[in-house]
Image (tube, grey):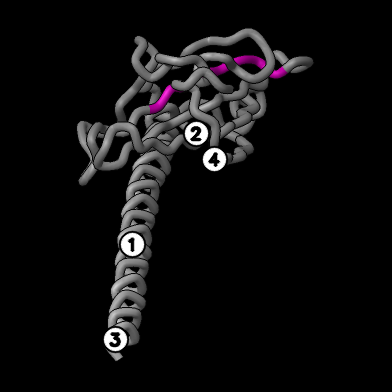
Amino acid sequence: MLPGALMLASMMLTTSAVWLEASIAQMRHAANVHEHLRAAHAADNALALCAEALRAGIAPVLLTRSGEPPQWSRPGAFDGPGAYEPAPSWPGSARAPQCVIETGLVEGSADTRTYWITSRGFGVNEAVQARVQLMIVRDEKREAREGGEGREGRERSAWRRIVTDAEAGST
């Protein structure tokens, strides 16, 4: 009788320990997802604010030759002189979100410019980051023909989420 009771008690204790470990793992996963969502939200809003700052002409813009610009993918790109903070802080984030804006001419068209706006947001921990990028193609000649100064003109845009970590050296 005693060996059976001890075996039943050990099985219940083992089951309880497994449930406790599973609930702790689930809680850590939920906290991790929450932090990544916070960072993605900050990056997405920074992207919108940086696009507005680009249109207003107040954000720094880095020039590139042709093709996709290299600055955003280099380690330390967000720590250099081309980095722009559209907001002084972000609620619950370790740091204010940042963006880097690069521009270049479209091959075959002297009047069409492409702007790459790359933003990064942070979670509570600075190691938790999210990056998103917006590419805007603007036809400046068409803008001048259709009313000139003060108008945004014609543009096309495409958004993408960046899943690689440039700080770690991968692009």
Residue positioned 39% across, 39% down in the render: 43
The residues bearing labels 1 and 4 have C-alpha atoms spaced at a distance of 33 Å
The stretch in magenta equals 99-106
Q: Judge the density around disc 3: few (<14), some (14-19), many (≥20) Cα neighbours within 10 Å.
A: few
Q: Is residue 66 left or right of residue 57?
A: right
Q: Is residue 108 left or right of residue 148?
A: right
Q: Is residue 108 above or below residue 159?
A: above
Q: Is residue 67 above or below residue 49?
A: above
* Residue placed under numbered mark 2 in the picture: 151
Residue positioned 58% across, 32% down in the render: 135
Q: Quadrant of residue 137?
A: top right
Q: Name which residue type carries label 2.
A: Arg
Mark 4 or mark 2, which is nearer the start of the sequence?
2
Q: Judge the density around disc 4: few (<14), some (14-19), many (≥20) Cα neighbours within 10 Å.
A: some
* Residue placed under numbered mark 1 in the picture: 21
The residues bearing labels 3 and 1 have C-alpha atoms spaced at a distance of 24 Å
Residue positioned 49% across, 28% down in the render: 165
Q: Name which residue type carries label 1.
A: Glu
